[in-house]
Amino acid sequence: MKNTGYIAYIILGLIWGTPFIFTHWAAAHITPAQIVLLRVVSGVIPVLVFALATRVLKWWHLRHAHHFLAMAGLATALYYLAFAKGTILLLSSVAGMLSGAIPLFSCLCALVFLRSEPLNRRSIGGMALGFAGVLVIARPWETGLGTVDPFGVLYIVLGSLSLGASFVYARKFISPLGIAPAALCTYQMGLGAIALLVTVDMNGAGAIFNEPKAAIGLIVGLGAVGTGMAYILYYLIVQKLGAVTAASVTYIPPVVALFIGCALAGEPLHGIDVVATIAILAGVFTMQTGRQPQPETKAQCHQKCLV
């Protein structure tokens, strides 16, 4: 029923607006890399259970493990790590507002690298408007106390570019394989978790459990719900409402993050930031409506679920 899809749509928009405050809570106790590791490990569990329940995991998929590994780096490890580092350096509301530019960078990478999506005036105009919004939030012309950390903005931009690059990679090499998105996400997150387990120094990570709020926020809020359950909800939305409607859910999280940061965490709200966020979302909308790609399948849009 479509009603189920719309309910999932609203819930997913709310869930995707919370990672920034959970990251701030966890950052008071552990490192960004440790945050990402615990997030991915906690998130892959519900995704794996879902994939097993739907019986989409197949042995023959292993022949494409190199593609899954590339996606694990671009859309999981690098993306999450860059966003964790950026969020820590910024107010959670500012990081949330900047996250609205993720579809902008995905569109940019697609326009640059995919021949089927050429540039046109509408796309260029949307790109310029969106990047203008990012620039206004960053405000590099300001100096002194209370200014936005440029390195925090840079990390968010790099994370968005990494995710955008994963979109191009998936379109070129993974979508033609015809593998169910539940399986693709399981392999991607599973390999990402393994890579992080091997490379991340976990000394002192137990400190997160000294603060129950931070531990629950990270493992449940950011990991199991914000990453794992979010994917399942996204897949449900694609099934019930279609890929185009599912992609539009990315307009909700910046607003949710702004509300949480300002209303619940007491962060300052500047009118110019609200205007800039509107500009980013308007730019994304303009770019998306200006593109003329082939209709997406469920497999082609699976990587968008990991925001």
Image: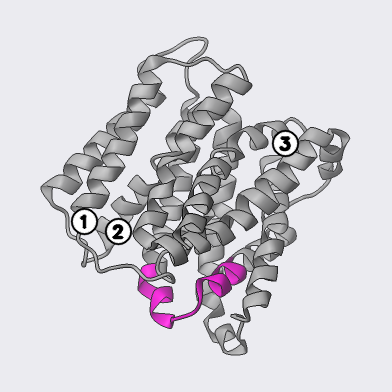
Q: Amino acid at mark 1?
A: Arg
| Residue bearing mark 2 | 110
The residue located at (50%, 39%) in the rendering is 155
Name the residue at 25% across, 69% down: 294
Q: Which residue is mark 1?
A: 291
Tag 1: Cα neighbours inside 10 Å, few (<14), some, or many (≥20)?
A: some
User: Residues at badges 1 and 2 in contact (C-beta under 8 Å)?
Assistant: yes
Crowd band around label 3 with a 10 angstrom C-alpha radius: few (<14), some (14–19), many (20+): many
Q: In what element is the residue under mark 1?
A: loop
Mark-to-mark CA distance, 3 and 1: 39 Å
- Name which of mark 1 and mark 2 comes first in the sequence: 2
User: How far from the left and from the top, in percent, is residue 240?
Assistant: 45, 64
Task: Left or right? Give the position of 155 relative to 292.
Answer: right
Mark 2 and mark 3: Cα distance apart in space: 34 Å
User: What predominant SS class does the magenta segment belong to?
Assistant: helix
**SS at circle 3:** helix
Range of the magenta residues? 171-188
Look at the image and say whether residue 18 sits in the magenta stretch.
no
Q: Kindly tell me whether residue 300 is visible in this rendering.
A: yes
In this image, 193 relative to 246: left or right?
A: right
Residue picked out by circle 3: 26
Which quadrant holds residue 209?
Answer: top right
Label 2 SS: helix
259, above or below 242, in the image = above
